[in-house]
Amino acid sequence: MRVLALVLSLVVVTSAFSNPTNLVLFLADDLGYGDLSCFGHPIIQSPNLDAFAKQGMRLTQCYSASAVCSPSRSALLTGRTPHRNGVFTWIAEGSEVHLRRSEVTLPSLLKKAGYTTCHSGKWHLNGLFNNPAQPQPGDHGYDWWMATQNNAAPTHEHPDNFVRNGQPVGPLQGYSAPLVVKEAITWLKKRDDSKPFFLAVWTHEPHYPIKSDPKFKALYPKLNDEVQQEHHANVSQMDHAFGMLMNALDEQKLANNTFVFFTSDNGPEGDGIKSPGRGSSGGLRGRKRDLHEGGIRVPGLVRWPGKIQPGTTSDVPVIGSDVFPTMLGIAGVEAPKDRTLDGVNAMGVFDGSVEKLKRPQPLFWRLHMAPNAKIAMRVDDWKILANADLTNFEFYNLKDDAKEITNLKDKEPQLFQEMKTRLIAHNAMVDVEGPDWWKRLSPSGGTDRDKGTAKKKKKTE
């Protein structure tokens, strides 16, 4: 009987490892918390993501790891808060800031575990793009990649600045999100299908400067504001591209064995009224470049058939840095133990086996951009914010006040002091571990379209 039990157990183990789960990380750019129909937008049409939400779980307290693009992206791939991994701000062209070779990334670990890997879309994790002086997508574990340094140029229409595996692609015909998804689908069809895959699709939509296919603008005939119409169409364009990818998974009979995570890198651009920036924060305070909820709380959707109950919703806080340990856990890959991880495996929340995540490190944000340079931390329902030099504080109970209207630092003095002490200590600890780029480079109040001035180096860390 013992021999039979051993044989059966070996069969179970072999079976589990013979059909590992595929992983997809779909990232929108500057998509606000309220920019999808399934998150309450009254006008924007997002039928594919709405359908996806019904097939999986909607995360109502999903956070990006920063209020700007590059830092939040670095946390997705490393599980580490941006000032710890070094990508402390958006990366201008030519900047010395980059995702360092010393960081251990999600695609690199999955590749070592036997996954085949692909990145398609915006990269924005180095200043010297397609230059051996800094690591490129392939150096961080991607077998195949097609990317841009930052925005699609000159706009989302007919971009000409993509690079594929180190070679400039040249002018493309079409619009950015569908183009990057077509690349991903082409790769899916020709990949080594004996291996599980990790696929990152990072669209440029709806980041400005935007351009939308006329067929998506036609969805909004009653909008007289052309800027608003272009923006809403741009979200629908991204939604259409997402649907293309989900249909490809269905057609290739991959959907049932694929975990998909959809989210955004930060809150919406602009003020929501004037150009540019007509995205919605869902009524939350703040927007992109702000550590109030509207700058960091973003749409989050997950699907894994048979594991995640369809049509469910979770209000447990999760953050971009959780993607790293969560996907590693799903793949059965051990997370590195030689460095501090800020994210945790959130799968217990997604499959309903736990009600709350245990976090050795608190939810933490730091924004090194004038005039909104701030630091923030959340523990349970309590959130504290401070200015860069830790002299001015705000304190909120997000359960009762998600819009952060009432500063409770004087009404809850004991709890406020405890949170203040913890925030100062945690911030100092993060400082010790990360590189000091942020001390040498001046904070920028500009937009992602500004140019950097850093000189190129022969080789960087």
Image (tube, rainbow, N blue to C red):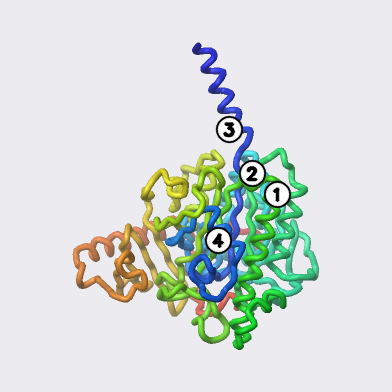
Q: Which residue is mark 1?
A: 143
For the residues marked 1 and 3, what is the alpha-carbon distance in whole angstroms? 25 Å
Looking at the rendered structure, the kind of residue marked 2 is Lys
Q: Which residue is mark 2?
A: 111
Residue at screen point 66% across, 70% down: 237
Residue at screen point 31% across, 63% down: 382
Residue at screen point 57% across, 23% down: 10
Q: Answer yes or no: do the residues labelled 1 and 4 have beta carbons within 8 Å?
A: no
Looking at the rendered structure, the kind of residue marked 1 is Asp
Q: Answer yes or no: do the residues labelled 4 and 2 have beta carbons within 8 Å?
A: no
Q: In the drawing, does residue 377 fall left or right of residue 320?
A: left
Which circle, 4 or 3, is nearer the viewer?
A: 3
For the residues marked 4 and 2, what is the alpha-carbon distance in whole angstroms? 19 Å
For the residues marked 1 and 4, what is the alpha-carbon distance in whole angstroms? 19 Å
Point out the tag, 1 or 4, that comes first from the N-terminus: 4
Q: Position of residue 339 (x, y in %)?
A: 46, 47
Q: Which residue is mark 3?
A: 16
What kind of element bears circle 1?
loop
Work out whether residue 455 can be spotted: no
Query: Which sits in the foreground, 368 or 206?
Result: 206
Which circle, 3 or 2, is nearer the viewer?
A: 3
For the residues marked 2 and 1, what is the alpha-carbon distance in whole angstroms? 8 Å
Q: Which residue is mark 4?
A: 73
Q: In the drawing, does residue 180 fall left or right of residue 385?
A: right
Which circle, 1 or 3, is nearer the viewer?
A: 3
Give the image quarter of residue 276: bottom right
Residue at screen point 66% across, 65% down: 240
